[in-house]
Image (cartoon, rainbow, N blue to C red):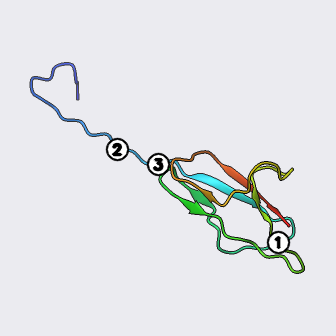
Amino acid sequence: MNLTNINSTITLYARWTPIVYNITYVLNGGTISTNKETYTIEDTITLDNPTKTGYGFIGWYNNEDYTGSIIVNIPSGSYGDKTFYAKW
């Protein structure tokens, strides 16, 4: 179809598909079976707590130095691959 010689009105519709991003969990010897492995910009993800025999879970961090705030979720509107580190 040649769109330069159109003599009538055409309506075009955009179709969007959200990008799927990966979530990686560094468990440091712990285990978890319920956390999601992917998300999109439309999702709100609550991070579940892992378990490790003989240890108490302190929280998820977005860096291996465990600095900054504990992370409990990925809010909608977030994007990009995420890695979370379990602190015991």
In the image, is 6 to the left or to the right of 63?
left
Task: State the count of labels.
Answer: 3
Which residue is more in the foreground, 15 or 52?
52
Q: Return the x and y of residue 39 as percentages of the image width and height.
A: 56, 56
Q: CA distance from mark 1 to mark 3?
A: 31 Å
Residue that extends furthest to the front in the rendered view of this protein: 69
Instruction: Identify the element where label 3 is drawn.
Output: loop
Camera-nearest residue between 48 and 67:
67
Direction from residue 29 to residue 10 in the image, left or right: left
Q: Which mark identifies residue 16?
A: none
Residue 48 at x, y percent in the picture? 67, 70
Say above or below: 52 vs 10.
below
Residue type at mark 1? Gly
Determine the residue positioned at 73% across, 53% down: 83
**Amino acid beneath label 3:** Pro
> Residue farthest to the right?
54
Residue at mark 2 to residue at mark 1: CA–CA distance: 41 Å
- Number of the label disc, if any, that sits on residue 15: 2
Q: Residue at x 75, y 72 (%)?
A: 50
Which residue is identified by label 1? Answer: 30
**Residue 11: % across, % down:** 18, 35
C-alpha gap between disc 2 and disc 3: 10 Å
Q: Residue at x 66, y 56 (%)?
A: 23
Query: The disc labelled 2 sits on which kind of residue?
Result: Arg
Residue, disc 3:
18
| Residue nearer the viewer, 85 or 55 | 55
